[in-house]
Amino acid sequence: AAFVFVIMCMAGTRPIIVLAEKIIGMIAKVLPFPGKMAFYISALIVGPILGSFITEPAAMTVTALILLDYFFSDEKMSMKFKYATIGLLFVNVSIGGTLSHFAAPPVLMVAGKWGWGLSHMLFNFGYKAAISVVLGTLVIAFLNKKELAGDFSLRPENPEHMHPTWWITLIHIIFLALTVITAHHMVVFLGVFLFFLGFTTVTQEYQDPVKLKESLLVGFFLGGLVVLGSMQKWWLQPLLASLDTLPLYLGSTALTGITDNAALTYLGSLVELSDEQKYYLVAGAVTGGGLTVIANAPNPAGFGILKGNFGEDGISPLGLLKSALFPTVLALIMFRFL
């Protein structure tokens, strides 16, 4: 919970957002699609896959802020488009962090105990997740091609804000890297965070206000899931241990929606499982990570950033579930058959 809080604060800063926009914009220019559609496709592929390196909470924060600025704030965009996009975003971020062993919360819970390193994740999960992210994004983009028609350009610099210089962006990246490297040592990365707060204060003319409140709420949410999720082991552990591979795969996907995927894999790590069962437990957990807001720790970050654009009633749980079904089923197929 503390790690997620710190990484969200660092990822939601102006230098990191501007850098992400530039990377997504450069990739969009080489895609053979109209400008607006190309940026949309690039954002929903590059952003979630970046989560494997800057962690899923950071990827969710960056991608959601970019979608908010360029698509969700546009009154012309229909509610159907917004639901399709948020469902795709949640699923893509959940599976997009599986190219490494330190980025996705459900993988982080078991990687150390089971000896899963970078190569294991890349060759057993990563490439399948990347294919699913690309295919799912292309399908959703083409289904909404009318709303994504037209020219596109990156937003002009705000004259009231000074544009972050390269060395400020570089120092932000170093802070992010130090936090990821020391993720298992809370005393160290909280010390790094204090230096980060000092740096943003000194360079405040290049910064937006640090998103402390939003990040803290997500941290409390995850902390509550870890505490309350461990209390479910009286029925989850015997259930996980008794399931064969395919029922375990589908069951963990479904259970993720009501228990949180990190809590699910943590409880699974306390049970003796075969290598095949371990694979399907984690594959199901990351695949179901977009079905509900509580299914994956980064989801509340995206929810908090985008909820204001879904009308007075906010994001409908049923609407999110329906919009996430297609990318979830696609990911299920990829992790099962590739």
Image: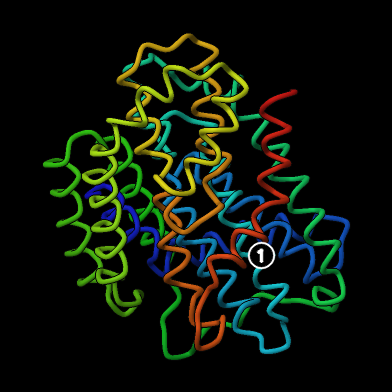
Q: Position of residue 244 (x, y in %)?
A: 56, 16
Task: Decide if residue 294 is on the left or right side of residue 66.
Answer: left
Write the residue at 32% across / 53% down: 7
Depth check: give the residue in front, 304 or 15: 304
Tell me: residue 164, above or below residue 195: below
- Mark 1 secondary-structure assignment: helix
Question: In which quadrant of the rendered view does residue 219 lie?
Answer: bottom left
Q: Position of residue 3 (x, y in %)?
A: 26, 47
x 58%, y 53%: residue: 47
For image coordinates 56% across by 75% down, the residue present is 68
Vertical order, 28 against 184 (above or below): below
Classify the position of the C terminus by image quarter: top right
Side of 276 where 230 appears, left or right: left
Q: Residue 44: horizontal and vertical position, in percent?
A: 65, 56
Q: Position of residue 220 (x, y in %)?
A: 23, 58
Q: Amino acid at mark 1?
A: Thr
Badge count: 1
Give the color scheme: rainbow, by chain, secondary structure or one colour: rainbow
Q: Which residue is the site of mark 1?
A: 85
- Front residue (pair 233, 201): 233
Residue at the image position 23 percent from the left and 39 percent from the top: 231
Is 274 situated left or right of 194 in this image?
A: right
Q: Is residue 206 above or below residue 51?
A: below
Front position in the image: 143 or 252: 252
Q: Is residue 206 above or below residue 45?
A: below
Using a 10 Å C-alpha cutoff, classify the residue at mark 1 as few (fewer than 14 neighbours), some (14 to 19) or many (20 or more): many
